[in-house]
Structure formats: C-alpha cells, structure tokens
C-alpha cells in the first residue's frame, strides 16, 4: 500500500509540472483526480481482476471522469459516458499537443487541452500502481510518471512557470519509493527520509541557477508554427482627424488607478503615403511575451463601446490579457479581438516601463534597418521631400551629444515649430508632412507624430508611431470614460538594450501660439527624462565604438536580483555534490583497501566482509554480526539459488579459517577468496537488475561497511 501511495504522489508531481502550460487553478483539480482515482482503482482491482481485465475498467472510469468534469457531457444511466463526451475527450487528446505547441502559454482558463494532462497522469498512475502491486521491482513503478514529467518539460519550456522544483520533488519521491520497496525495516526508511528531503531541497534551490536552466532548448523550433494572422482594418492614424472632429463620442471605459496612456495600435511600416502595422497576431491563453526592463504593474478592466477596428487598447506593455477572442502580436504586444466588440469586456495587467535618464544618455540606436527605412514614392522614384526631411532634422538636432538628445531635441523642435490645430486637414504622406513642416505649420497629433518618425529616420534613428488615448477623467467607482477627443499619437525610438522609448512631439492645445514647449498629454516621467537629457550639457559625447565590438547594453537589474540566490544555492548544491561524491567514491575505496590488506588473512576476511556488504546492498537480509558465516551463506543461497552455493560455502569456510582456524592462510587463499566474491557479486547483480543496482548505489546504506 505504501508503494501505491508513493506512485500516486509521483503522478501528482509529474502532473503539476505542467504549471506554466496551464494555470495552477485549472491544473490542481484535474491532477488531483487523475492521480488519486486510478491509484485507488488499482488497489480495488488487485487480486480481483487480471491485468487485461483491469485496463478496460480503468479506461471506462477515465472517460466518465473526463466527460463529467472537463467536458460537462451528459452520461447514459448516470455512469456510462455518452457519445458527445467520448468524442470530445478523444478529440481533445488528439488536438491538445499541436495546440499547446503553437500558442502562447499558459493556456486560457477553461481550455479543453487540459484533457491531455488528465490522460497522461491517469495512465501513468494506473500503470505504476499495477507494477507496484504485481511485481517486486524497486524503481520501475516510477517509470510511467517519469515519462509524464518528460512531456511536461518539453511542453513547458515556453510557459511562464519552472519545472525545476517539480522535478526535484519527483526525484526525491522516486528515491523514497526505492527506499520503501527495498528497505527491510522502518529504521532504514526513517534514516533515509531526511537525507532524501535534503537532496530535494538542494535540487530545487540549485536547479534554477545551473548554466542551462534559464534558457533550455525549445522543442517548438522543430514544429512548423502557423503564420501569424494579420488583422486588416483602417489605419488608426487615419482615424485620428475624424475622432478629433467628434470629441464627445464614447469609445470605451476603463477601470484603473493609473494615469498611463492606453496604447491602441503600433504603426511601423511606411510606404510613402500612409503608416500601417506589420503586426501578426497569434492566440494566447492570457500571457503576453516580450517584456524587458524594470516595470510597474498596473491593472485595467475595459468595456468596449463604440471603438471601431479590431484593436483593443491597453497600457504599454501588456503582460496578461484575459477576455473572449483576444489575440496578441508577440513583437509589439498589441491586442486585438476576433469576436464582436461592442459591449466586450476584458482585463489587462500591464508593466509600465521605467527609464533612467543615465541609461538613456548612454544609449545607442538599435540595429533595425526596417525601422529606419524611408521608401521611394508610389511611382518608384526618390521623392524630393526625403532630402528636405534630412535637412530639417539635422537643423533641429544641431548640438546634440547623443542619439537620445537628438530625439529629445527633435520633439522640442516640432512642439515650437507648429500649432496643434484639431481642424487641420488630415494626411501623413511625404507631401502632407512637407506642407506641414514648411508652409502651414498647423496640424493635429497625426502630423506631429508622423513628422517626428520621418525626421528621426532621416538621421538614422529607428522609429515608429503609436496611436492611443489618454485615460480620461476618473468618475464614480474609479471608472474612466474615454472619448474620441482623448486620442493622442506619439512616436517611439528603439535603443539597444532598452527597447522602444516614447517621445511626445505634439504641443499642448492650451499653449498653442504662445511659443512654449509643452507636450500634449506627455506623462510626467517622459517630461522629466526629456528635461534631464537636454540639460546634460556637461556630459561628453560618447565615443564611437568600432563596428567589430558589441555595444554594451544597459538593462536595469530586476528587484531582488544579485548574488544572494547564488550564495544560498551554494550550500545545498555543495551538500548534494558531496553526497554524490561520497556514494561514488567510498564503496570502491573500501573494497580496494580490503583487497590490498596487509596480510593474506586480512585479505580473506576483507573478501568475506565485502561479500556481506554486497549481499546486504542487494536486499538479502544478512548481517555478519548477528549470524555466523555458515548461516549467512545459507540465507544467501536461498535467495540467489544454486549458482551461488559453492562460492558462498567455500568463502565462508575460508573466512572461518582465517578468523578462528589454527592453520595459516596464504596469498593463494586470499586470491581464491576474492574470486569467490566476484562470483557472488555477479549473482547479486543478475538478481537486482540495472535499476535496482542504481537505486542501492545511491542509497545511504552504500556508505555503511
């Protein structure tokens, strides 16, 4: 019974290793049922049905459990699963692997792909329990659960969790299973449990800091991923002017305590006439990958009203998004919906990036040719406006000592150059921007953001445009009503090791015509950073680095990081290494010392003691202190069979002769005694098998002589 309990725990540990592939709340009840029920079932059927009869019963009970719990399917007569439940279970198993390998993990709550975990854990636990009940194998019952753990490792590489703690617990449970099945007394088990607990703790702590633990190989590289799905719609930048003409139109509400801007669309592709998005959207279970740098967590709850297009607003950058039909662009973090939008509600957890002025002053532009591209015109010719843009940009950034100062000066130049006029004509192509910069000098946030992006590209700064909204004013219950008049466009520059940094070139409408340099809607942090960058006149210009040498990146260290985890991991990792070294070195050194004892009689006695140690390590209940040599040989013969009778009896006689006999023992007797030991050792090895020998070699009893 104890062995079955250990098998159930092994199945549960392997199933919970899918943490990161599925959410903890969804995984726990499924694993609990899939691990406990087959273990109980195996005990009830043991001795009543042969194996070929127990397997169909287990399959039927699994179908009932899965149909009732995961698929909520009706059953015939309250027990036998109906066709819908069986079909749903089998289809779920068939499609789960492919779906999990081609989506952003973890899976969404309620995902039916979790039926794969239910099947694997159930089958492994039932198989392991049957092996434990029907055989005397020591470690073989852990084999099925080990295969489940391997699947969890393969699927969970791209997940949000870590499999290392579960693997450490699994290893400890497997060794405990071997100890329970091989131990001859409660005292042996009591001695081994603390040592195994120490090993589990050491593995759980040291595992994450191993060289390959943070970036293991992802099997998804071997799977052909479906192409990201583009979502077509009118460019958000083309809608800015229309929104500003109808400023009271209610677009959506958001419940949040943050004043962060709500990003709607990222536009990174310019064709000479308009800016569009090259985003490709993939399904997600909620997680949005790709965050970098130090961030502040912000919770938001949205309700869509009259917001056109497929995109969904969220503070940059989303880390978790839950709602019906949400898809995500992994490159930009943009959110979109594949379902009807009016009345839709969804929740987003975002990480607001924090920038330090010092790191920005030292930053260099990222190597992103696509984000620096200024294309030819629609007729395929080089537009004359391109050269004009370069002249304006160089004039605006004269005296800048760093790329970030170039960007800051460019934003300030545009804010002082032109007036923010909501009645200005729309358009952001080459001709529209040239007219805005050189003649009208009146425009909406559309023209200011587009001008900044094009001017930045003309001097080699990788840029893109973002269209979003200010969060609106707080109302009752913390709900903020966002209207069309809250729309705002800004630009972003990409820097190595930092990512995309926002700049706000649109001047305030309330200060229009006063010649002031006040940005429309710029958050407090953006204003402070821009001021710090522009005021750093004492900072020397960073020297250009040779192209052959990589430019160092400046990335803030996450809170709580440092050498602390390494220091704490060193002690248990050292204990684990010391234990493995001891079980690997002590037994062979002890055998060598006995074989090379100072006298032939001592070598004969050493051969006998080594034989007793070998028999005890092989699970044969002998003790040289409680039994005579003849009694030890008799007990061992009954366990090993006739093949071991002659060497055991002869070796026992030599041991008695060397210990109690009056006749001298010579070197020939010593050599013969060790040949007898070799024969007994071979018999013990055949009896124990490979896994049994490995388990006993790692057992603490191997250190006892």
Image (cartoon, rainbow, N blue to C red):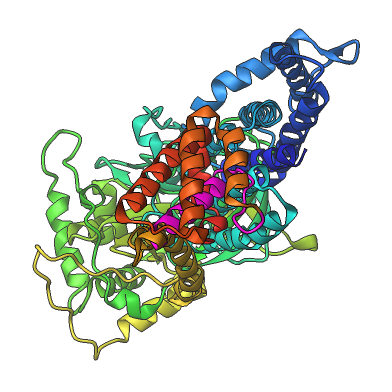
Report the number of numbered marks: 0
State whether residue 230 is above or below residue 247. Answer: above
Residue 536, by quadrant, is bottom left
Percent position of residue 435, x then y: 26, 54
Is 499 displayed left or right of 243 in the figure? Answer: left
Is 84 displayed left or right of 317 in the figure? Answer: right
Q: Which residue is drawn at 56% across and 26% down?
A: 96
Please say whether residue 678 is one of the residues in the magenta stretch: no
Q: Residue at x 22, y 75 (%)?
A: 402
Please say whether residue 615 is one of the residues in the magenta stretch: yes
State whether residue 512 is above or below residue 451. Answer: below
Does residue 447 show up?
Answer: yes
Does residue 174 show up?
Answer: no
Percent position of residue 639, x then y: 60, 34
Residue 590, by quadrant, is bottom left
* Extreme-bottom residue of the structure: 538
State whether residue 118 is above or below residue 154. Answer: above
Magenta segment's dominant SS is helix
Percent position of residue 44, x then y: 83, 25
Percent position of residue 688, x then y: 52, 36
Q: Which of 682 and 598 is in front in this view?
A: 598
- Which quadrant of the figure contains the N terminus? top right
The range drawn in magenta is 602-626
Q: Which residue is drawn at 67% across and 36% down?
A: 342
Is 211 displayed left or right of 368 in the figure? Answer: right
* Extreme-front residue of the structure: 662
Q: Residue at x 9, y 63 (%)?
A: 548
């Amino acid at each position: 019974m104890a062995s079955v309990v250990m098998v159930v725990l092994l199945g549960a540990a392997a199933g919970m290793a899918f943490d990161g592939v599925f959410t903890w709340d969804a995984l726990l009840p499924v694993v609990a049922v899939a691990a406990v029920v087959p273990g109980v079932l195996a005990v009830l059927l043991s001795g009543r049905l042969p194996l070929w009869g127990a397997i169909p019963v287990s399959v039927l009970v699994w179908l009932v459990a899965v149909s009732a719990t995961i698929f909520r399917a009706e059953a015939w007569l309250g027990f036998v699963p109906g066709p819908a439940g069986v079909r749903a279970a089998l289809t779920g198993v068939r499609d789960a692997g492919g779906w999990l390998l081609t989506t952003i993990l973890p899976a969404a709550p309620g995902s039916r792909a979790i039926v794969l975990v239910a099947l694997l854990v159930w089958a492994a636990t039932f198989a392991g329990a049957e092996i434990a009940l029907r055989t005397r194998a020591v470690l073989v019952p852990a084999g099925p659960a080990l295969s489940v753990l391997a699947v969890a490792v393969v699927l969970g590489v791209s997940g949000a969790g870590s499999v290392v703690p579960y693997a450490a617990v699994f290893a400890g449970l497997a060794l405990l299973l071997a100890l329970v099945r091989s131990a001859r007394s409660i005292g042996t088990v009591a001695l081994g449990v603390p040592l195994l607990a120490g090993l589990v703790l050491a593995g759980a702590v040291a595992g994450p800091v191993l060289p390959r633990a943070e970036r293991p190989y992802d099997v998804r590289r071997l799977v052909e991923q479906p192409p990201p799905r583009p979502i077509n719609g009118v460019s958000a930048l083309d809608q800015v002017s229309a929104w500003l003409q109808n400023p009271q139109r209610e677009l959506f509400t958001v419940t949040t305590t943050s004043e962060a801007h709500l990003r709607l669309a990222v536009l990174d592709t310019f064709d000479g006439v308009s800016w569009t998005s090259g985003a490709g959207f993939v399904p997600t279970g909620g997680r949005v990958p790709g965050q970098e740098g130090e961030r502040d967590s912000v919770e938001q709850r949205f309700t869509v009203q009259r917001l056109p297009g497929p995109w969904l607003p969220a503070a940059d950058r989303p880390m978790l998004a839950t709602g019906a039909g949400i898809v995500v662009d992994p490159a930009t973090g943009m959110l979109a919906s594949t379902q009807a939008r009016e009345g839709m509600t969804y929740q987003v957890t975002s990480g607001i990036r924090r920038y330090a002025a010092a790191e920005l002053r030292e930053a260099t532009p990222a190597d992103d040719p696509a984000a620096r591209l200024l294309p030819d015109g629609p007729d395929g010719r080089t537009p004359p406006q391109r050269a004009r843009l370069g002249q304006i940009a160089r004039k605006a950034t004269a005296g800048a000592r760093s790329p970030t100062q170039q960007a800051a000066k460019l934003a300030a130049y545009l804010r002082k150059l032109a007036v923010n006029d909501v009645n200005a004509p729309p358009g952001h192509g080459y001709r529209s921007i040239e007219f805005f910069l050189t003649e009208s000098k009146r425009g909406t946030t559309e023209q200011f953001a587009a001008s900044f992006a094009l001017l930045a590209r003309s001097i080699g700064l990788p840029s893109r445009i973002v269209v979003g909204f200010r969060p609106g004013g707080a109302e009752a219950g913390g709900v903020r009503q966002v209207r069309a008049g809250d729309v705002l466009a800004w630009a972003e520059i990409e820097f190595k090791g930092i990512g995309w940094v926002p700049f706000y070139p649109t001047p305030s409408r309330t200060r229009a015509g006063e010649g002031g340099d006040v940005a429309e809607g710029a958050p407090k942090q953006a204003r402070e950073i821009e001021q710090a960058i522009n005021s750093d006149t004492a900072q020397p210009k960073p020297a250009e680095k040779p192209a052959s040498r990589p430019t160092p990146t400046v990335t803030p260290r996450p809170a709580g990081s440092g050498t602390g985890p390494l220091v704490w991991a060193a002690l248990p990792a050292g204990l684990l290494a010391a234990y493995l070294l001891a079980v690997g070195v002590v037994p062979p050194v002890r055998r060598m010392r006995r074989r090379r004892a100072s006298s032939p009689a001592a070598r004969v006695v050493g051969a006998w003691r080594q034989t007793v140690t070998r028999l005890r390590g092989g699970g044969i209940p002998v003790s040289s202190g409680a039994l005579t040599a003849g009694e030890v040989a008799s007990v061992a013969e009954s366990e090993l069979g006739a093949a071991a009778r002659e060497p055991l009896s002869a070796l026992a006689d030599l041991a008695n002769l060397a210990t109690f006999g009056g006749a001298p023992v010579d070197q020939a007797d010593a050599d013969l005694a060790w040949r007898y030991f070799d024969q007994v050792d071979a018999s013990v090895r055949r009896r124990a098998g490979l896994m049994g020998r490995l388990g006993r070699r790692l057992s603490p009893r191997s250190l006892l002589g």
